[in-house]
């Protein structure tokens, strides 16, 4: 059985209000009813003290009798008042004549006060009917017994209506969200009151749906692009193998076919490796194996690995000239392997899009320096640059711009991987054009203190 927020809220509010109302009603009855009786007792006590003081003086007996009759005739605290005065157990006076019998009858509606003088010689007893006070207390009790449940019922009904009105946007949201599916992510929940709690929650929900729609769209594009990229080497591989086995061939022809098949396989392996790397970087919540890394030393290692004069395998690789300018120590905290891949991808991108020629040429400048609390490293090339229409998508997956550059190669994921590595290290990459041609890829990473020497 489902219990809604509305029902639970009503239950807990009534669970709080019912005991509170009962306690308040009981306290009101006690305070009001007892107050009336207490006021009667105080008034009777004062009258008894007055009578006892007058009897203890040489007051005129006629005046005392008149005082008793006047006090007995007062109806402020009840219509019937009974007064008895005794001395040493002997009744001196009683008003009216049956006062002694009425006081001794034990009637529960009589409020009785007895006062003795200081020497104990005179005792005054006064009783009055408290029927009016008791009746008022009973009426208050009856009124509360009827009024409290009625008020609670009205409060419950009002709370039910108010919460229903307040939670109606959630009901509408739940119905609309049920209509959302992978093929229908454009549904949004209308926001009736954007400034209240429900409105803010619905607004956040709509923003989440926007991000989800964008992520699903990106995933679909990514899947389509990956399938397209894999289809090309698979087609080359299959076509080459079909042609190779269509008729007997010489050993040289078989070696050429196997070479093409191997190249297509290597491209698919590299694409799969890049896709796995992107998936790992996006899914990882933290860096793996973070250690102090000296970017100066790393850039020098990369420069040594990429330098070539073009004489070796010049038909495949470009002639790469690399200049390195770094400060003595540019330390960051991160994963050395990922950072190496970041800068290697930037260099590889610059080489792939180098200046056309035979062989193609790539002139690079690498630098690293400390600025305040960050390390800024740059990879600068002197190629033809990036076409204006390619700038918005320079870090997009599988995007290869042509804009006057040499024919692109690779998987189209190098810059995307570099950007994800920078983000994982709480840094960023910015690409700008270089005066006179070429591009500047500027990497900014949080600086770290140099480790203590062992």
Image: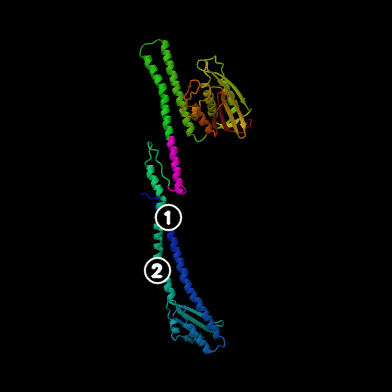
Q: Nearer the viewer, residue 219 or 279?
A: 219
Disc nearer the start of the sequence (1/2)? 1
Label for residue 12? Answer: 1
Q: Secondary structure at mark 1?
A: helix
Reply above or below: 361 against 415. Answer: above
Is residue 193 shown in magenta? yes
Magenta portion: prevailing SS class: helix
Residue matched to label 2: 142
Task: Name the residue: 37% across, 41% down.
Answer: 179
Q: Secondary structure at mark 2?
A: helix
Q: Is residue 326 left or right of residue 273?
A: right
Circle 1 Cα neighbour tier, 10 Å, few/some/many (<14 / 14–19 / ≥20): few
Reply above or below: 134 against 198. Answer: below
Q: Nearer the viewer, residue 71 or 115?
A: 71
Q: Nearer the viewer, residue 256 or 398?
A: 398
* Residue extent of the magenta highlight: 192-215
Task: Name the residue: 43% across, 25% down.
Answer: 229
């Amino acid at each position: 059985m489902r219990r809604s927020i509305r029902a639970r809220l009503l239950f807990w509010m009534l669970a709080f209000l019912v005991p509170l109302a009962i306690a308040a009603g009981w306290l009101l009855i006690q305070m009001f009813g007892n107050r009336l009786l207490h006021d009667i007792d105080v008034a009777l006590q004062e009258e008894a003290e007055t009578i006892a003081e007058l009897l203890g003086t040489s007051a005129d007996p006629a005046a005392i009798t008149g005082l008793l009759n006047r006090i007995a005739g007062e109806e402020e605290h009840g219509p019937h008042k009974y007064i008895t005065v005794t001395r040493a157990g002997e009744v001196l006076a009683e008003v009216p004549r049956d006062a002694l019998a009425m006081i001794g009858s034990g009637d529960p509606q009589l409020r009785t006060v007895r006062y003795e003088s200081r020497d104990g010689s005179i005792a005054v007893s006064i009783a009055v009917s408290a029927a009016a006070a008791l009746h008022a207390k009973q009426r208050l009790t009856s009124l509360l017994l009827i009024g409290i449940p009625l008020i609670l019922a009205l409060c419950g009904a009002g709370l039910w209506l108010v919460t229903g009105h307040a939670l109606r946007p959630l009901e509408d949201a739940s119905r609309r969200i049920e209509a959302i599916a992978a093929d229908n992510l454009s549904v949004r929940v209308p926001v009736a009151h954007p400034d209240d709690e429900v409105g803010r929650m619905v607004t956040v929900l709509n923003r989440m749906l926007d991000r989800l729609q964008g992520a699903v769209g990106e995933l679909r594009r990514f899947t389509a692009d990956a399938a397209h990229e894999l289809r090309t080497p698979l087609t080359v591989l299959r076509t080459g193998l079909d042609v190779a086995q269509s008729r007997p061939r010489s050993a040289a022809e078989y070696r050429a076919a196997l070479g093409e098949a191997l190249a297509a396989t290597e491209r698919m392996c590299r694409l799969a490796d890049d896709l796995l790397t992107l998936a790992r970087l996006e899914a990882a919540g933290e860096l793996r194996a973070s250690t102090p890394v000296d970017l100066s030393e790393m850039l020098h290692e990369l420069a040594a690995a990429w330098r070539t004069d073009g004489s070796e395998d010049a038909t495949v690789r470009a002639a790469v000239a690399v200049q390195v300018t770094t400060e003595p120590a540019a330390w960051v905290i991160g994963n050395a392997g990922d950072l190496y891949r970041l800068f290697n991808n930037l260099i590889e991108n610059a080489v792939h899009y180098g200046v056309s020629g035979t062989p193609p040429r790539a002139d690079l400048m690498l630098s690293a320096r400390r600025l305040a609390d960050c390390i800024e490293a740059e990879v600068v090339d002197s190629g033809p640059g990036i076409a204006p229409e390619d700038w918005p998508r320079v870090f997009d997956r599988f995007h290869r711009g042509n804009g006057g550059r040499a024919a692109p190669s690779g998987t189209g994921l190098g810059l995307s991987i570099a950007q994800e590595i920078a983000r994982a290290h709480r840094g960023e990459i910015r690409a700008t054009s270089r005066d006179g041609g070429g591009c500047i890829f500027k990497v900014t990473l949080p600086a770290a203190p140099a480790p203590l020497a062992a």
